[in-house]
């Protein structure tokens, strides 16, 4: 059961990191085109990194937790 839960955490963490990273990349790409037109809004590029960084950190935490569960030795005395 521990391996199943670890695998689920690992998969969820990878998906959250992937999706938040791709979304942040798209928003930064759109923002970069806006900055090319008006260089005074360069600060607008930091907002997606701040907002997208929180889900990425949560996904990374789930990934590390799931990986640690998968690397623990099996208990032989489980019913």
Image (cartoon, helix red, strand yellow):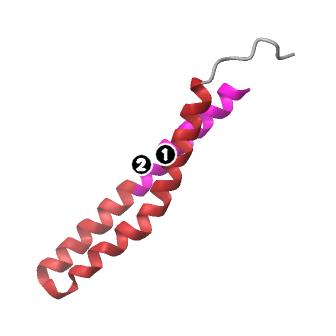
Main SS of the magenta segment? helix
Residue positioned 12% across, 77% down in the render: 36
Name the residue beneath numbered marker 1: 15
Q: Which mark is residue 18?
A: 2
Tell me the element at label 2.
helix
- Residue 20 in percent (x, y) is at 43, 57
Q: Which residues are magenta?
A: 1-20
| Label 1: how many Cα within 10 Å (few below 14, some 14–19, many 20+) | some
In this rendering, the answer to whether 68 lies above or below 78 is below
Q: Is residue 45 visible?
A: yes
Residue 67, quarter of the rendered image: top right
Q: Nearer the viewer, residue 27 or 61?
A: 61
Q: Nearer the viewer, residue 50 or 24?
A: 50
Q: Is residue 47 magenta?
A: no
Q: Is residue 16 magenta?
A: yes
Q: Quadrant of the C terminus?
A: top right
- Residue 47 in percent (x, y) is at 35, 75
Q: Is residue 53 left or right of residue 40?
A: right
Residue positioned 32% across, 68% down in the render: 27
Q: Is residue 38 visible?
A: no
Q: Nearer the viewer, residue 20 or 2?
A: 2
| Label 2: how many Cα within 10 Å (few below 14, some 14–19, many 20+) | some
Residue positioned 58% across, 39% down in the render: 65
In this rendering, the answer to whether 44 lies above or below 54 is below
- Residue 3 in percent (x, y) is at 65, 26
Q: Is residue 20 left or right of residue 30?
A: right
Q: Residue furthest top?
A: 76
Tell me the element at label 1.
helix
């Amino acid at each position: 059961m521990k391996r199943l839960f670890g695998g689920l955490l690992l998969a969820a963490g990878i998906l959250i990191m992937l999706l938040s990273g791709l979304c942040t990349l798209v928003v930064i790409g759109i923002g970069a085109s806006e900055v090319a037109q008006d260089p005074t809004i360069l600060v607008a590029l930091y907002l997606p990194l701040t907002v997208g960084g929180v889900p990425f950190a949560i996904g990374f935490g789930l990934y590390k937790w799931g990986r640690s569960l998968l690397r623990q030795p099996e208990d032989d005395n489980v019913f």
